[in-house]
């Protein structure tokens, strides 16, 4: 059993993570404890899963390094300097993804392919999230934009009710229009994926990992 410290335990993602760990003992993960802003940690753990704030993510990263344990963050809108720091990490396994869902990762690959196939088409990227979301456009939309060289400032967005997360890429000419859409129906999509990534990260060597590494692992695993 790997012991998980959830950073941002009282948040929407923190609560979903705790519930799913407890509901799925077959995952081989156990809830070691949670942390909120300013709290100290006095219990043992093997991996930190952080979904909090940029400040919270940096505090949790320092904690993971101090204890030489694996660190996974899905917190968005992280400062470039911190991203660089995580990318340079050599003492612990570190994972970061602005969207931890494997299906969103593959969706981004589809959009990349489409951008090549529909070269010359006008592109529009649009995202919709819940009204509580602090950053806009979403980290996922920025990621998709970067993947196809689309200017981030041209990504359009809406904040509607409790929408979990919808991302669309539309390719158009005056004659036709193609839209690819990924719609997350439940926050558990991210929480469940984060738990699978955390379990895998505990088996990884020291260094920095992204969704590409996890997707490669899953694809290889599927071929066994
Ligand atoms: N990568 C992905 O796939 C993915 C998916 C979903 C969400 N996210 C991202 O994950 C983050 C959290 O999302 P959420 O919807 O769970 O937000 P949320 O409901 O606002 O929860 C954030 C939690 O973090 C706590 N927190 C604030 N500062 C902290 C600190 N310094 N140390 C520890 N905890 C701290 C907050 O406490 P207070 O309320 O007391 O401030 C709150 O309980 C956001 O950046 C969001 O964009 C990413």
Image: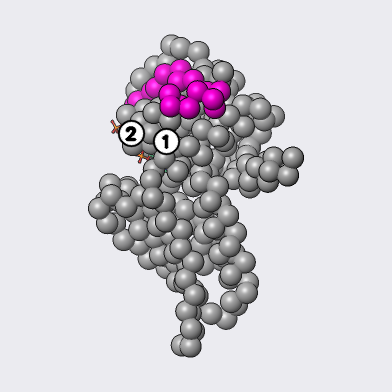
Q: Which quadrant of the render holds ligand 1?
A: top left
- Mark with earlier residue (2, 1): 2
Q: Nearer the viewer, residue 6 or 63?
A: 6
Q: Position of residue 156 (x, y in %)?
A: 37, 65
Furthest-bottom residue in this view = 175
Say whether residue 24 is magenta: yes
The residue carrying pointer 1 sits among few (fewer than 14), some (14 to 19) or many (20 or more) residues within 10 Å by Cα, namely many
- The quadrant holding residue 83 is top right
Find out whether residue 168 is within the magenta segment.
no
Which disc, if any, is residue 11?
2
Quadrant in the picture for the N terminus: top right
Mark 1, residue position: 51
Q: Residue at x 46, y 88 (%)?
A: 174
- Residue 220, image x and y in percent? 72, 43
At 45% across and 20% down in the image, what residue appears?
Answer: 31
Other-residue count near label 2 (Cα within 10 Å), few / some / many at <14 / 14–19 / ≥20: few
- Residue range highlighted in magenta: 21-37
Q: Nearer the viewer, residue 147 or 15?
A: 15
Name the quadrant containing residue 10: top left
Q: Nearer the viewer, residue 89 or 219?
A: 219
Q: Is residue 113 visible?
A: yes
Q: Tell me, yes or no, if residue 55 can be seen here.
A: no
Looking at the image, residue 222 sits to the left or right of residue 31; the answer is: right
CB at mark 1 closer than 8 A to ligand 1? Answer: yes
Q: Is residue 130 above or below residue 150?
A: above
**Do the residues bearing badges 2 and 1 touch, measured as CB atoms within 8 Å?**
yes
Callout 2: CB less than 8 Å from ligand 1: yes
Q: Which residue is drawn at the image coordinates 42% and 36% (left, top)?
A: 51
From the viewer's perspective, is residue 86 above or below residue 119?
above
Q: How far apart are labels 2 and 1 at the CA level?
A: 8 Å
The residue located at (41%, 51%) in the rendering is 184
């Amino acid at each position: 059993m790997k012991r998980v410290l959830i950073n941002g335990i009282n948040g929407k993602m923190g609560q979903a993570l705790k519930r799913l760990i407890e509901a799925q003992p077959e995952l081989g993960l156990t809830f070691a404890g949670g942390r909120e802003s300013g709290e100290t940690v006095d219990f043992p753990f093997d991996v930190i899963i952080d979904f909090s704030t940029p400040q919270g993510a940096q505090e949790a990263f320092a904690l993971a390094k101090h204890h030489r344990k694996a660190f996974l963050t899905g917190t968005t809108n992280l400062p470039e300097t911190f991203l660089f720091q995580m990318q340079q990490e050599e003492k612990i396994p570190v994972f970061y993804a602005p969207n931890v869902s494997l299906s969103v990762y593959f969706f981004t690959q589809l959009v990349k392919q489409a951008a090549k196939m529909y070269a010359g088409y006008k592109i529009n990227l649009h995202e919709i999230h819940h009204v509580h979301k602090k950053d806009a456009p979403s980290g996922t939309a920025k990621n998709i934009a970067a993947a196809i060289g689309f200017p981030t400032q041209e990504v359009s967005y809406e904040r509607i009710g409790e929408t979990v997360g919808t991302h669309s890429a539309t390719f158009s000419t005056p004659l036709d229009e193609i839209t690819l859409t990924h719609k997350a129906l439940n926050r558990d999509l991210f929480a469940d994926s984060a738990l699978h990534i955390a379990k895998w990260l505990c088996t990884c060597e020291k260094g920095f990992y992204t969704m590409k590494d996890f997707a490669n692992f899953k694809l290889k695993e599927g071929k066994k």
